[in-house]
Amino acid sequence: MTGIIPLKKGENITSFFAVNKVRRIIGEKKCGHTGTLDPNATGVLPIAVGGATRFIELLPTHKKAYKATFKTGFCTDTLDIWGTVLNETNKKATLEEILNVADNFRGEIMQLPPMFSALKKDGVRLYELARRGEEVEREARKCEIYTLEIGEQGEEFTLYCECSAGTYIRTLISDICERAGAYGVMTSLERTYACGVSIEDCFTLEQL
């Protein structure tokens, strides 16, 4: 079997687990994903099967899209709700305050990669260093935000973003909230587009 399986990854499983599950379902030893999703994130995870694994690097990666939710008033070491709370205040940003600063994050921006990420420093994953309580110097990286829409849903804010590869939505949310004068953390994340695949075209593990 050779091709791309457009998988919709569920919550609380790693991308590695998802690939292994697909491998067992279809009986194909050679399988590989096209871009890691965090265990708590859901959404588009294209999986190359058989001979297609040789062409993963040729898939289009210049554009990705995400839906997320976030809260303000506290921050964590991972920049999301699953981390350890570092600071908490009574100051919470309003939607108006968030929208007033949003224009600063459209187009080309510089972004500092979070410590809890898969990037390597001297051959070691940053998240491995972070788990040991170490923080190292990182270089800000250029990324591009093509579309940024922010709304309100109950006690949380909603965010839709189309962006270049390498953009960290957790960092984007944290930076927007900081510019608005408040702490902020991501509370959910769904990738809706990646490698030319839309979430509407994806299958869950259960469907496979």
Image (spheres, rainbow, N blue to C red):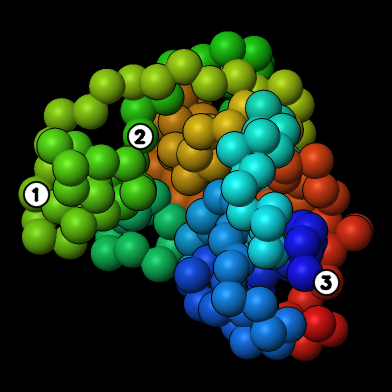
Determine whether, in the image, residue 149 is placed left or right of residue 35: right
| The quadrant where residue 41 appears | bottom right
| The quadrant where residue 64 appears | top right
The quadrant of the image that shows the C terminus is: bottom right
Give the number of the disc on residue 113. 2
Tell me the SS state at disc 2: loop
Rendered location of residue 11, percent (x, y): 60, 75
The quadrant of the image that shows the N terminus is: bottom right
How much space separates mark 2 and mark 1, taking CA atoms?
A: 15 Å
Callout 2: 10 Å neighbours few (<14), some, many (20+)?
many
* Tag 2 and tag 1, C-beta contact below 8 Å: no
* Tag 3 and tag 1, C-beta contact below 8 Å: no
Kindly tell me whether residue 87 is visible in this rendering: no
* Residue on which the image places disc 1: 134
Give the number of the disc on residue 203. 3
Tell me the kind of residue under disc 2: Pro
Rendered location of residue 43, percent (x, y): 70, 61
Task: Point out the frontmost of discs 3 and 1.
Answer: 3
Question: From what the image shows, is residue 163 above or below residue 11?
Answer: above
How much space separates mark 3 and mark 2, taking CA atoms?
A: 30 Å
Q: If you read the primary sequence from the N terminus, does the residue marked by circle 2 or circle 1 appear first?
A: 2
Tell me the kind of residue under disc 1: Glu
Determine whether, in the image, residue 35 is placed left or right of residue 111: right
| The quadrant where residue 8 appears | bottom right
> Which residue is found at the position 52% from the left and 55% from the top?
36
Question: From what the image shows, is residue 36 above or below residue 138?
Answer: below
Tell me the kind of residue under disc 3: Phe
